[in-house]
Amino acid sequence: MRQKYGQNFLIDNNIANNIVKASNLNKHDKVLEIGPGRGILTKIIQPQVKQLTLIEIDTNLYQQLKHYFFFHDVENVNVVNVDFLKYSIPDMKFKIISNLPYNIGTAIIQKILPLQNWTTAIFMLQKEVVKRLSAENDRKNYGYMSIFTSYYADCTILFDVSPKCFRPSPKVVSSVIKLTNKFSLPPEPIFFDFVKHAFSMRRKTILNCISSFKSIGKDRALQIIDNLNLESALRPDKMSTSDFLNLTNRMKKYTISHI
Ligand code: SAM
């Protein structure tokens, strides 16, 4: 069961305080916490904010949290027993704080980032995943999730957390990141499709990536590349988010009848 729900509980109060501090909470804030678990972050957040919504999939933990807040006569906490991936996020502005269940951390980030109703998110995740999310200048970890994240958010790595700070201990080091919503409108649908396609063949040239995308073919691909003054031997991992945006805008014009 623990494995299934990614349950590595934080046991270090200093780390918990630093995670919450990073969110700069105030009395007007509405906060969403995904996977409150035994409530180490929750109990620090609750007295500082106007409203706290907790989304916990594990029914036992949900009941324990419900009882705890009922017996402490706390009125600003709403506990919901649901899988966050199936939860309809309410239409209000909120901050997010979560020590994410690592098995579905990326899926949770993909659900949240495109939304317009969060302002900042403090997430703890595996260090390796955090490197991928924030890899703009780190070619080794640069990929689809780096571009997805940078399209929707500004990203700052805050600090690492040792496996010793959890029970049971995870096998890997964790990192805490802060994301700030850029409130970007959804891109053209081909943007993320093409980024995914390009990184699925990251050792190939951009000419190859374009030619093989939705059967554009080499002639059109060369036209597109010429038009943008791109180097045809460029690899996808040398291209920034805005390079991909320019490219897919151009591809859309050249291939409108095609895609
Ligand atoms: N916040 C606690 C802490 O810092 O100790 C617990 C963190 S633990 C890494 C992840 C938590 O997310 C667990 O309580 C787990 O039950 C919960 N969880 C796992 N999958 C979930 C899902 N799909 N929706 C909501 N909660 C989930």
Image (tube, rainbow, N blue to C red):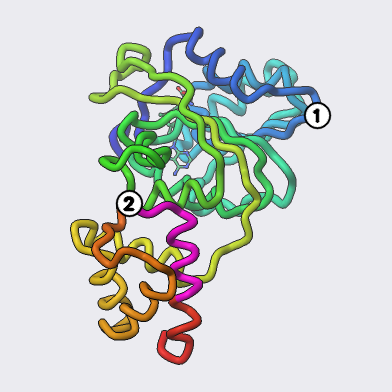
Q: Residue at x 53, y 70 (%)?
A: 188
Q: Nearer the viewer, mark 1 or mark 2?
A: 2
Q: Residue at x 31, y 78 (%)?
A: 222
Residue 225, given in percent of the width and then of the height, sits at: 36, 72
State the extent of the magenta-drawn residues as a range. 238-250
- Quarter-of-image position of residue 80: top right
Name the kind of residue labelled 1 in the image. Answer: His
Q: Is residue 152 magenta?
A: no
Q: Is residue 245 magenta?
A: yes
Q: Is residue 147 visible?
A: yes
SS at mark 2?
helix
As measured in the structure, the alpha-carbon distance from the residue carrying label 1 to the one carrying label 2 is: 42 Å
Q: In terms of depth relative to the viewer, which is nearer, 155 or 117?
A: 155
| Disc 1 + disc 2, Cβ < 8 Å | no
Marker disc for residue 65: none
The C terminus lies in quadrant: bottom left
The N terminus lies in quadrant: top left
| Label 2 crowd (10 A; few <14 / some 14-19 / many >=20) | few
Predominant secondary structure, magenta span: helix
Residue 253, given in percent of the width and then of the height, sits at: 50, 82
Q: Residue at x 48, y 79 (%)?
A: 252
| Residue under pointer 2 | 238
| Residue under pointer 1 | 28
